[in-house]
Amino acid sequence: MKAVHFGAGNIGRGFIGPILAESDYEIVFVARNEKKISLLQERGQYPVTLANESRDTELVKNVTAVSIKDVDEVAESIAEADLVTTAIGMSALKDIAESVARGIKLRFKKKKRPEPLHIIACENGIGGSQRLKKLVYPLLKPSERKQADELVAFPNTMVDRIVPIQQHKDPLKVMVEPFCEWVIHKAGMLDGFTKIKGVRYVDSLDPYIERKLFTVNTGHCAAAYFGYLEGFSTIQEAIANPTVLKQVRGVLQETGAMLTQKYNLDSKKHELYIEKMIKRFTNPHFTDKITRVGRSPLRKLSPNDRLVRPAIQAHKMGLKTDHLVAAIAAALVFDFVKDPEAVKLQNSIREHGIGYVIEHHLGIPDSHPLHSRIADKYNECFSSHRSGDQPDVLSQL
């Protein structure tokens, strides 16, 4: 079997690649980095090391790569593939839509009876595959869309593995945490699909997506933003601090209360899940920089992402949101000068004011009760941050 994967970064090589290789897929990475492309073509394999005590390493074999610039070769690869996956970021899906459409067109042209094709966007967000479909379909002719309705599926998915930014002498080497989870919406699959080893297929994906997004992603970025205010440089340092740990656990208890009520989850099991996720953040075998986890604050503060969305839902249910409000305020203070989004956020606050940003970037109107609470907590955090004092963001909780 053959898989085409868009993105030869750490997630693609460290997460999706090993799982597909375990199911005997030959993998074609579609990438931009010419050095990685050349090495993947030359070696046909690369090492993946687990961030555990023994540093277990496996070789992912039967791989190659093509350049995203080589549109004909990319289309040819898709035309011959059994599976297409991505790990490039939700915002970048629009950049590959034309390549995916070309591959589908060529597939239909070359084969009178083409085999079914599954296209799965393994991105850190909700509805990635369907978003990609909405970008691809307008690029197909009506007759091609009709054929794609029967032969091409875009099942949504949830993926989870922490892969920090890293530097190795070998550009292909990647270190990942031992934990990983990949869940696919079963109803989105076409009949006859060969299951991927290690992947869970479920009837309802939403509980898995929101549980992961509002526990792992919410907790991770909360640790980053609280830790940034406290002056720490890594997630491991931040979580080791009792104050930050208390703040993060408080955030996850609030998202947990919302999730258990919304999806009728077992509260005791979810509490164990929270503690397991916090333990992942403290993995001593790699260093995860706060500025990496906290990067792109505008995206993380958007209405449907990991901070604002659970806060709005919890408030609507009449649940506590004090810690979530504090995490949102801490994110609004994030002013790392090497992060373009952080710079843009701070410029917007200076130019328009915090109320404008809460309404227009976070999507929370000034009439909403959370608006004023976030603004007040932001002013508290901002004043302490500017003065150089360590802010007590829990002072009013």
Image (cartoon, grey):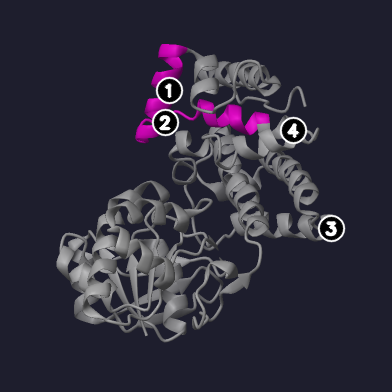
**Mark-to-mark CA distance, 1 and 2:** 6 Å
Q: Earlier in the sequence, mark 3 or mark 1?
A: 3
Quarter holding the N terminus?
A: bottom left
**Amino acid type of the residue that numbered disc 2 sits on in the rendered structure:** Ala
Q: Residue at x 76, y 53 (%)?
A: 263
Question: Quick check: can you spot residue 179?
Answer: no
User: Image quarter for residue 319?
Assistant: top right
x, y (%) of residue 90? 42, 50
Q: Earlier in the sequence, mark 1 or mark 4?
A: 4
**Mark-to-mark CA distance, 1 and 4:** 29 Å
Pick whichever, 243 or 291, lies toward us: 291
**Mark-to-mark CA distance, 3 and 1:** 40 Å
Contact check, label 1 and label 2, Cβ < 8 Å: yes
User: Circle 4: is it few (<14), some (14-19), or many (20+) Cα within 10 Å?
Assistant: few
Q: Label 4 belongs to which residue?
A: 316
**Amino acid type of the residue that numbered disc 3 sits on in the rendered structure:** Lys
Name the mark on residue 342.
2
Name the mark on residue 346.
1
Which residues fall within the magenta stretch? 325-352
x, y (%) of residue 40? 24, 74
Question: Quick check: can you spot residue 303?
Answer: yes
Q: Label 3 belongs to which residue?
A: 268
Q: Earlier in the sequence, mark 4 or mark 2?
A: 4
341 in magenta: yes
Disc 1 vs disc 4: which is toward the camera? 4
